[in-house]
């Protein structure tokens, strides 16, 4: 009834907004001080929350970095242990084990190989060319074998070797590619055994057959 009367009058629709505007105008000077204080408190609380969140993020990042560093150290220790075990195995191998570059440079060799070449220390041969210890008539064949290995193939060759002191031996080498992480062949791994006694026995047998054939 009364409400409906006001609603039918056009000026009544402006009464409520006007009253609100007037009340806000009276309260604003007083509320401004408290509003500023409230705003400052909110900002301070937000700052504390943000600083706490950043601190937590920093702690998480620091913990992750520490875990990564620990895992890396563990991996390095594991690799070092594996390398040491491999070195011990190679050094105890009774046959010659050598690592060679594509141009024939000797990168490493175990003690058995040093004895075959008549060298006392690794420094006597590391950095030297393997071709210096191969009989001249076998160098081309050895070069062909090396090329095959660096193409990614395995290869076998018998050749005559001349030691540092002039001793001659027949050697049989089995060579395979040592691959880098990207799959390319970085070096040749050769396992070489002394077959001098076998070759002498074969030569003696050949001479015996030849002699028998002549007698017949």
Image: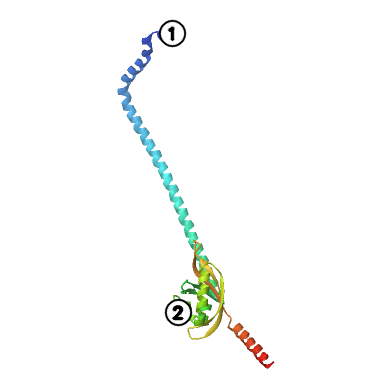
| Front one among 181 and 103 | 103
Q: Mark 2 packing: few (<14 Cα in 10 Å), some, or many (20+)?
A: few
| Image-based side of 88 in relation to 16, left or right | right
Residue 87 image position (x, y, % from top left): 52, 71
Mark 1 = which residue? 4
Pinpoint residue 55: horizontal percent, then vertical percent.
Answer: 41, 44
Q: How many marks?
A: 2
Residue at point 31% right, 22% down?
A: 28
- Closest to the observer: 148 or 91? 148
In the displayed structure, 123 sits above or below 86; it is below
Residue located at (43% from left, 50% from top): 62
Q: Earlier in the sequence, mark 2 or mark 1?
A: 1
* Quadrant assignment for the C terminus: bottom right
**Which one is in front, 62 or 172?**
172
In the picture of the structure, the residue carrying the numbered disc 2 is 124
196 or 212, nearer to the observer? 212
């Amino acid at each position: 009834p009364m409400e409906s009367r006001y609603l039918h009058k056009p000026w009544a629709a402006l009464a409520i907004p006007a009253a609100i505007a007037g009340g806000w105008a009276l309260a604003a000077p007083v509320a401004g001080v408290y509003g500023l204080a409230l705003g400052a408190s909110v900002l301070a609380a937000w700052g504390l929350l943000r600083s706490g969140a950043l601190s937590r993020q920093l702690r998480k990042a620091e913990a992750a970095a520490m875990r990564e560093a620990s895992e890396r150290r563990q991996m390095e220790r594991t690799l070092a242990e594996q390398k040491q075990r491999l070195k011990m195995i190679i050094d105890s191998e009774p046959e010659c084990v050598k690592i060679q570059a594509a141009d024939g440079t000797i990168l490493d060799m175990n003690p058995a190989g040093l004895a075959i070449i008549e060298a006392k220390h690794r420094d006597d041969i590391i950095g030297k060319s393997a071709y210096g210890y191969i009989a001249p008539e076998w160098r081309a064949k050895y070069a062909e074998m090396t090329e095959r290995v660096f193409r990614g193939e395995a290869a076998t060759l018998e050749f005559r070797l001349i030691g540092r002191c002039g001793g001659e031996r027949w050697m049989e080498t089995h060579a395979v590619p040592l691959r880098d992480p990207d799959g390319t062949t970085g070096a040749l791994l050769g396992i070489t055994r002394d077959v001098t006694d076998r070759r002498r026995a074969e030569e003696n047998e050949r001479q015996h057959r030849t002699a028998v054939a002549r007698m017949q």
